[in-house]
Structure formats: C-alpha cells, structure tokens
Amino acid sequence: MQVIFIHHSCFLVEIDDKVLIFDYFGGDRIDGYHFTGKIPSYQPDTPIYMFASHTHKDHFDMDILRWSGQYTNIHYILSKDIRISPNFLQKHGIDPAVREQITFVTADHTYKVDGLDIQTLRSTDVGVAFYVEYNGISVFHAGDLNDWKWEGAGDLINGKMSREYRHQIKKLATKPINIAFVPMDPRLEENQFRGIDYFVRNTDAEFIFPMHMWQDYSGIREYKKRISNLGMADRIIEIERENQVFPFGENS
C-alpha cells in the first residue's frame, strides 16, 4: 500500500490493483494559492476511483470527469450536492455518458462499488465523509467533517458544531481504520487542533494524516508536541510537502 499527499485535502491511496483518489482539484483553482500536487500517470485500464466529498472548489474539480477519456476503468463516487446534469456536461464539453460511471452518495448510507465497501458520514459543513474498506484495508477521509469552532461564531453555533462532530466520529469508534485523513485547518487559530485531537483520542486509527492546512504544515509538529502519550503522537504522520510519498507495508 502506498499513500501520496497530492495537496490540501487530496490524497491518493494505492491498494493492490486499485487507486483511490480523494478530493482532487487543479492547483490554480483557489485564488491566492498555487498548489503543485500532480496525480501520477497509470495504465489506461487501471481501476481508478475518484472520491469527492462535496462541491467546494478545494474538494471537487469538474475536470476530473474528463479523465474518463484517458482511463477506461475509472469510477466516480461523488457527494449528491455535486449536481451534474446532462445539459451541464454538454455545455462544458464533457460527454454526458460519463454519468454512467458516477455513483452519487448521500450521508449515512452504505454503497458497494466493485470491490469497495463504502460508508458515508454526514459532514459538519457540506456533503459527506468517506469510510472505505477494500481487501482488508480501511481508509477514512473526512472531507470537511471537522469541529469548526470559529472565533465570533458564538457559543450556540460552535456548541452545535462540536456536538455534531462528536456524534459522527463516534460512529467510527469500533471500526478498524488503517489510514485516516482529518482536517487541521490553521485558519481556526487556537482551535486548529480540536477536531483532530478528538479523532485521535476516540478512534483506533493506525495512521492519521492531517489535511486542509492551506500549505502551512507547521501545526503538525506543534500538535504532536502537545501529546504526552508518545504512542498516540506517533500515529500522526508529518507532512512536509506536496507530492510526498508514504509507503506502507513490508517494503516500506
């Protein structure tokens, strides 16, 4: 198994014969940022599964639908808030037949796509989070499911956010998780670590990748220093750059 941090919240996971790609978008889609992450090239018949947790432009890029012309065995698992009508696709020069390769998902449901078992959780923002199992490997991608405590939002809103976040994460408490991708957004300032800290302490995730960091990875080491339990701290993977490769398994 191999994990590649592409950029922001986009990760690529290679499991045996399959490639899972979560929340990809082109590097110049976000004003004020230039993301450099690139998806590796694969053989045209490689089984590729593109996940998009919601419609926000830092999590979904319509151009991924054009990849169906390059990869014959590609499938899309898209949150239902991503609306793609045949007329919309035609207007943007995309073959409407691509819809046959899309599975639209909603929160709190389970799906089976080829050999992938997929469970969705409800985001505290928009869309879904994904829990995916394949061939004995389990992967969790939070999307924008996080404890978004914003200064100035007020105790009522922030309190509701925290309760809902905890409710969703508790659904994972008894599940095996080999790899998890969880937000650690520096825009939250002193509240940056709230969501991931709850996740670390209330799941058995083996390896946890912080994400949604807007190219500022300094918080990872700061957070790890705050954890007194060294075994728990070691579960947090330190990301240093886009396109960083993390091998797991016998040859890692």
Image: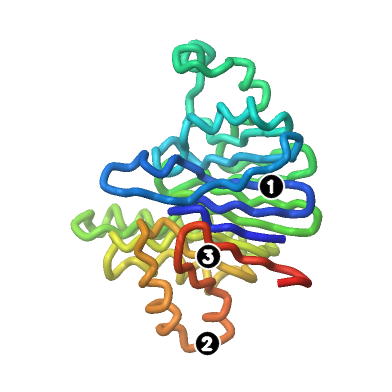
Kind of residue at badge 2: Asn
Kind of residue at badge 3: Phe
Q: Residue at left 36%, top 72%?
A: 218
Quarter occupied by the C terminus: bottom right
Residue receiving disc 3: 209
Quarter occupied by the N terminus: bottom right
Residue 207, quarter of picture = bottom right
Secondary structure under badge 2?
loop
Q: Give x and y (percent) for residue 5.
A: 53, 58
Kind of residue at badge 1: Val
Viewer can see residue 121 = no
State the residue in front, 187 or 168: 187
Question: Mark 1 or mark 3: which is in front?
Answer: 1
Residue 229 - label: 2
Q: Residue at left 26%, top 47%?
A: 32
Question: Mark 3 or mark 2: which is in front?
Answer: 3
Q: Residue at left 48%, top 51%?
A: 37
- Which badge, 2 or 1, comes first in the chain's sequence? 1
